[in-house]
Structures are given as C-alpha cells and as structure tokens.
Image (spheres, helix red, strand yellow):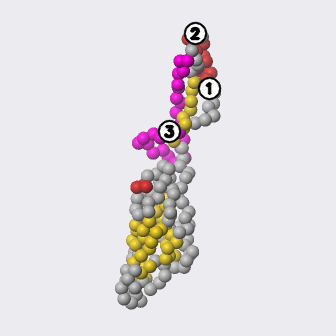
Amino acid sequence: MNETQRSRALEATARRPIPRYRQFMVSGRRPARSTRYFVGIVALLALSGGLASVALARVAGPDRTPPSFAGLESATTCVPGPVAGQSTSYVLRWSPATDDVTPSSKIAYDVYQATTSGGEDFSTATYVTRRGATTFTTPPLPADELVYFVVRARDRAGNREANKVERQGVNLCV
C-alpha cells in the first residue's frame, strides 16, 4: 500500500462512527452541566503497513449521579433544668458523603426540619450548609417542643440523594 492509498484509507476510517467511548477526565476544567466535549484521537498502527484507526473519546459529560450518603447520625442539644420557655440550638452531625465526580469537600447538605415525625417538606430545605460540612448548628428553637431533622447531600451538579434517615432532637442535659 503506497502513501496515497494509506492517506485515503485513513480519511475513510476517520469518517466511520466508533460505537465505544473511552472516558477521560480533563484536569482543571469544570464543564457546564449539560455540555459534552468530544476529542478525536488518532492512533497510527504500524503493523505490516496497517491502516490508521480513529477512536472517539468522551472527555466529560453531565453528572447525573447523586452522592452516596448515610444520613444524619445525631441531633443533640443541652438545656439543663426546666426547658419551658427556653430556646436552644441543636447540633446535627453526620459522616461525609461521597460522589463519583464531586469531592467530599465540595458537597453541600440540605437540612429539613419538622415538628412531627415524617413531616419534613423535601421540596424546600429549611437550612443549607457550607460545602464540606459534617456538622450544622440550628438557630435557636423552642426547647420545649419536639423537633425532627433529615439531612441530604447535594453535589456540585445539583444532584440530591434521597435518604429518609430522620433523627429527633435530643436534650442530653435533662
């Protein structure tokens, strides 16, 4: 096969769709949520005058996978003595979530609060933590009322996991 024939064969091969993709991460780039980037990679095979082949690599695509998160571990406060008429802040604690794209230090948490068990409104978070937090302190709440919490993890792409682990606020000093 001469140079002209190899060149024509390469052009014909480059026009064929490649059914499989190899996934790569591009360091330092944060693609838009719905943008896909494609890169053509040409690999010349020098096996007995073999043809050049072209592979299409998917560099980045939208992140559609929510984080993995075990949920809220505890919701505690300390109000010694009679609690009637007092206010208190609850400290919520959890282990960090993990995600296939977003590092744990960049995952935010949505905190849902209710006055009855199972009464959380998951359409709107009551509080939102800073990214990477593993604790959250509520603003003062009535110490003599029951309060329940659910915490859910959210990655940078906005994917929210849907755990239902609920904890009742507990006064450790009564």
> In front: mark 1 or mark 3?
3
Q: Is residue 33 above or below residue 171?
A: above
- Which of these two is toward me, 142 or 44? 44
Quadrant housing the N terminus? top right
Label 2 close to label 1 by CB (< 8 Å): no
Q: Amino acid at mark 2?
A: Asn
Q: Amino acid at mark 3?
A: Phe
Quadrant housing the C terminus? bottom left
The residues colored magenta run 23-47
Would you name the residue on which mark 2 appears?
Answer: 2
> In front: mark 2 or mark 1?
2
Look at 53% across and 55% down and name the residue there.
66
Would you name the residue on which mark 3 appears?
Answer: 24
2 or 1: tag closer to the N-terminus: 2
Local secondary structure at mark 2: loop
1 or 3: tag closer to the N-terminus: 1
Q: Position of residue 43 (x, y in %)?
A: 52, 25
Would you name the residue on which mark 1 appears?
Answer: 15
Q: CA distance from mark 1 to mark 3?
A: 22 Å
Q: Position of residue 14 (x, y in %)?
A: 59, 25
